[in-house]
Amino acid sequence: MAGPENLRYHAKPGDSTPARGEFTYALHVNGFAIHVNQVRSSSPVSAIEQLRATRNGRRVMSAGEDGANHVEIIFDSAHVEGRTRDKAFQFDFDHASGPALGQDQLRQFSWALAAAPRRFALGPKGEYHPDNPNQDGHAEAIGVIVDLPIRLPDGPVHVGDQWSGEWTGTTRKKDGASFQYRQNAQLEEIIEGPSPRARISFSTSGLLQIVPEKNSQGEETTLDARGFVLLEVATGLVDAGESAGTISTDITSLGLKIVHEITATYTSP
């Protein structure tokens, strides 16, 4: 049996890995027709049924204070295709596209989801802190799916070992709600090579905790995600990964269910 591995994230200034991959997003709205139509017509963004992006860039890690690692995923180019209830759309973005988006909300949303840089802090053991959690939206929960933050074990582990972790997300401004997350992970294998990589699988669940007196509509929001990463054992850098997940909101007072379905993959060329 191979010896135990001490898994941790760590970085030095300039650590960079090429990254390419795909991102998909789908919005499902179910319930009485009047409520579904209200949601779908509330904005161009809510009219989206499916979106798919292929993108190329790099993943950059740099060392921060107290052992934290600053992670930035920069997309040099992204091609987006999708459809709303009424039409198909497609956009091409490059690293300089952001400031020139204009007033097209569909284009803005596509850029924000598929081409905007991802920035977050990752502690040595996977403590996750997005730079802009959007405290009244689902940005943090989306990040828990697409940024692949896996909580690592406190001590050395062998192939096949499992562990779990729990944490509380950022407090939402409008009602003081926050996600309670739980994650299970496993070291599946060590892939040998010039730089051995640990394949770590994970499943993450989350429940948005809302104070009852501030939840007049009976909202219940849950997160479910699963995937894996390849972590270079020696460097502490994420080489590749993929995830798939949903953020589901049931509004019981309206008989309405809204599901955001998301997948993301990253590979090094």
Image (cartoon, rainbow, N blue to C red):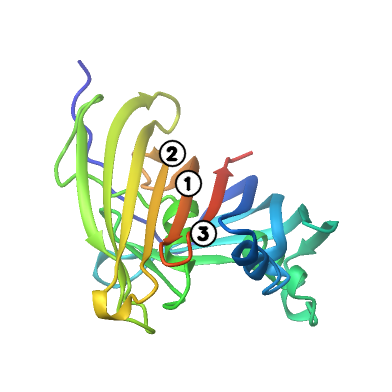
Discs 3, 1 touching: Cβ within 8 Å: no
Q: Quadrant of residue 194?
A: top left
Q: Residue 193 at x, y = what percent?
A: 44, 25
Of badges 3 and 1, the one in the foreground is 1
The residue labelled by disc 1 is 245
- In the image, is 152 to the left or to the right of 47? left
Please state the horizontal and vertical placement of residue 156, each as a whole percent of the image.
16, 37
* Mark number displayed over residue 60: 3
Tell me which label, 2 or 3, sits earlier in the chain: 3
Q: Is residue 191 left or right of residue 267?
A: left
Q: Quick check: 260 left or right of 149?
A: right
Q: Residue at x 36, y 47 (%)?
A: 236
Q: Nearer the viewer, mark 2 or mark 1?
A: 1
Q: CA separation, marks 2 and 1? A: 9 Å
Q: The residue tagged with tag 2: helix, strand or loop?
A: strand
Q: What whole-number distance in Å separates the C-alpha atoms at marks 2 and 3?
A: 21 Å
Confirm or deny contact between disc 2 and disc 1 (CB under 8 A): yes
Q: Is residue 41 above or below residue 149?
A: below
Q: Amino acid at mark 3?
A: Val
Relative to 214, is 47 above or below? Answer: above
Between the C-alphas of marks 3 and 1, the distance is 24 Å
Residue sitting at 20 percent across and 43 percent down? 164
Q: Which residue is mark 2?
A: 227
Res. 116 visible in picture: no
